[in-house]
Image (cartoon, coloured by chain):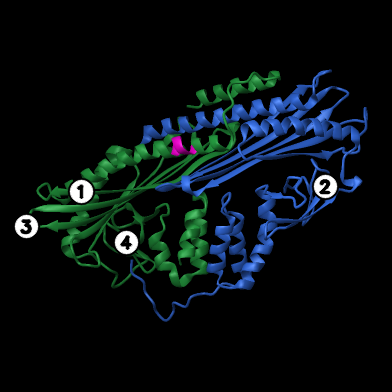
Chain colours: A blue, B green
Amino acid sequence: MEDRISEEDEYEELADDQKVAIGKWFLLNAPPGQVSQVAKDVREVLMDERLYDQAAKEAFPEYNVKNMISLEMPDGSGQVLLTEFGQLDRSRYLDPRTASVAVVDHVKQVCTEVRPADDEDLPSAYVEGFRFSVDAALMKYVDDAFQGGECSVYCTKGKDVEKSGGEFELTVVICNSSYSPKNFRGGCWQSVWRVLINEELRTATLQGTISVNAHYFEEGNVQLESSRKFNDTVTLQDGKDAGTTIVHVIEHLESVYLSSLEVMVKSLFEVDAVWL
Amino acid sequence: MEAAMDLMRRMPPSLSQQALDSLLALLPAHSSELLSRSDQPLQVAYDEEFDKHYLLCDYNRDGDSYRSPWSSKYKPELEDGVQPSPELRKLEQEANEVFAIYRDQYYEGGISSVYVWEPEDGKGFAACVLIKKDGSDGGDGRRGLLQEGAWDAIHVVEVKEDQERQMGHYCLTSTVMLALTTANRASGPFSLSGSITRQMESDISLEPGHLCNMGRLIEEMESKLRNGLDQVYFGKTKEVVFTLREPLGVMSASSHVGQTLQRMIVNDLAHSR
């Protein structure tokens, strides 16, 4: 508890770029829903508006995409999800559902403008048929299972493919983040499913990653972090909607993951009890 | 400074060491306060003279040196480092021996350290009892489930004596930091980490002596904490996950692989125990 101040104890001042790096690190690691409070704190500890602005300018674009922030589109057509799959450039993001491009101000976390997308950014009508079908089934699933969650379906490979023209890939994204200080909790669920569709073989091959982060902070501070990869293949049957089939698999695997989390925590505690 | 403490509270527990290091670099003038107000996993030092390990905290720190509870010497060496009074040092030595036994009984290993000091108002005394246990691969190798399992307990007790009534007033504040990570490769990375804090106050007769009273209080507290951990780590975090994604009832898979996968995961976990 003692402190010594001697002549040799000169506080080493950090260089500007080191301070900006620290500010950026705090912003990037802000938990779901808390970035504005973290920003306020960072501003204070940096004690220099100029340095804060630099840190914010560098951190927010990365933060927004990493956390799949959704922003209200000014034309009232809904929310646009900011993800790497829809990123056209540093400030423009595609919303496949409305076939429009949203222009965003990352630091203010606001969508400033919406324009219709160029044809070259959109998939062929053939691919769009599948994308639309998956999106429709997905919205219903997300509505049922994720309170407040957002989702989107992108065509990430083979967007110009026509019927019998080969494979194409759709990427399904689900993001649900929440922060409730009065309940002392917060967290985020993110799933990214790469769906490779081969209409000739009538298969959809899925590769998914689900990541969960849960935070509870009453009389303490506890965090659960987990992620898991899944692989599966499903047959697309004639007369059965492809979107429904694909989303059904996603729903099942995500449910399996949810129950495995419960088992995981429980088993950790049984081990814990032994050595404690 | 308050902004710094707020940042510490908001950062995820797994990043709290890095967060503290960054703030110390950014605000060197506040390092003393930052160190005393943040809970970090306990670091370990080695006392060559006694061939024993000891734990580091703000209460045995003087500048950049830390005092061993065994030799009472500072490392790195300090000529005139702060020392407890001879009376308190005697209590401290006894406490270290008693809690070493307690620790062995309950934890079957681990490291413990007790530091005693006189509080600023000069009334009574204060003590902190630190326990650190690493239950990872080494200790639990045969189970193979835990990749990392670290338990750090910090108990700070303030004692005031009422000599007339022969009663002691004990105020205990305890924090347990727990970090659990699974090594089960098939299920992907999984970690539960963080801390919980509880407080207890009690008026006890001075007859059994301070060590006995403190020992009993801490024992009671650790059991409370153990239950709290169960509730919080297991119960509450599960609740949080369920608010993000609701369990939708059992669905039959439309693909053969989905069902096989479910069986595999359950078997995986059952066999790795």
Residue A107's place in the image compared with A252, above or below, is below
What type of secondary structure mainly makes up the magenta span?
helix
- Residue at mark 4 shares a chain with residue at mark 2: no
* Residue receiving disc 4: B60
| Marks 3 and 1 belong to one chain | yes
| Tag 3 residue | B164
B234 inside magenta stretch: yes
What is the C-alpha distance between the residues marked 4 and 2?
62 Å
Label 4 chain ID = B
Judged left or right of residue A76, residue A186 is left
Which of pointers 3 and 4 indicates the residue nearer the eye?
3
Q: Are marks 3 and 1 in contact (CB under 8 Å)?
A: no
Residue B7, x across and y down, in percent: 50, 59
Q: Where is residue B15 in the image (x, y as percent from the top left)?
A: 52, 52
Q: Pointer 2: what residue? A: A100
Report the Cα–Cα distance between label 3 and label 1: 17 Å
Q: What element carries label 2?
A: strand
Kindly identify the amino acid type of the residue bearing the numbered disc 1: Ser
**Among the two numbered marks 4 and 1 on one chain, the one whose residue lies closer to the N terminus:** 4
Answer few, some or many: residues within 10 Å of disc 1's Cα (few below 14, many 20 plus, some between 14 and 19): few
Between the C-alphas of marks 3 and 4, the distance is 32 Å
